[in-house]
Image: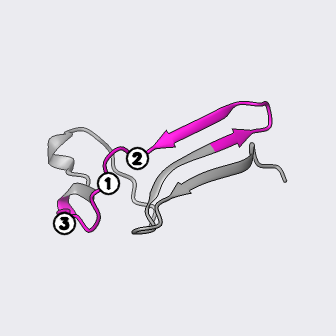
Amino acid sequence: KDAQFFKIKMIITKKDRSIQSWTMFDKSGNKYKYTISKFAPNVNVADALFTFDTKKYPGVEVIDLR
């Protein structure tokens, strides 16, 4: 009940059940529409893409809170 948005409308394709777009309605009367123009499922992504490389940023302090 404390959320900024009170309604979300989603457009989903029947064929493959993927999300095409969604609209978020906030309590002040604004609407925010997001549309997916290109979607590529099951893309192979290298693990290095999700790893911060400290060698590229010398002098940066990394704090690992795991």
Q: Quadrant of the C terminus?
A: bottom left
Instruction: State the residue in front, 15 or 4.
Output: 15
Amino acid of disc 2? Ile
Q: Position of residue 54 (x, y in %)?
A: 21, 49
Judge whether residue 51 can be spotted in this image.
no
Q: What numbered label is drawn on residue 44?
A: 3
Residue drawn at (20%, 51%), measured in percent from left and top? 53
Instruction: State the residue in front, 57 or 23.
Output: 23
Q: Is 15 placed left or right of 8 in the picture?
A: left
**Mark 1 vs mark 3: which is more N-terminal?**
1
Amino acid of disc 1? Phe
Instruction: Quickly name the residue at label 2.
Output: 36
Residue drawn at (58%, 54%), measured in percent from left and top? 10
Q: Is 18 placed left or right of 28 in the picture?
A: left
Q: Is 13 placed left or right of 4 in the picture?
A: left
CA–CA distance in space, label 1 to label 2: 7 Å
The magenta stretch is 24-48
Instruction: State the residue in front, 55 or 35.
Output: 35
Q: Secondary structure at mark 2?
A: loop
Q: Are marks 1 and 2 in contact (CB under 8 Å)?
A: yes
Q: Secondary structure at mark 3?
A: loop
Instruction: State the residue in front, 65 or 5.
Output: 5
Q: Position of residue 47 (x, y in %)?
A: 21, 65
Residue at the far front in the pictured view: 15
Is 33 part of what is drawn in magenta?
yes
**Mark 2 vs mark 3: which is more N-terminal?**
2
- Label 1 packing within 10 angstroms: few (<14), some (14-19), many (20+): few
CA–CA distance in space, label 2 to label 3: 19 Å
Q: Which mark's residue is nearer the viewer, 1 or 3?
A: 1
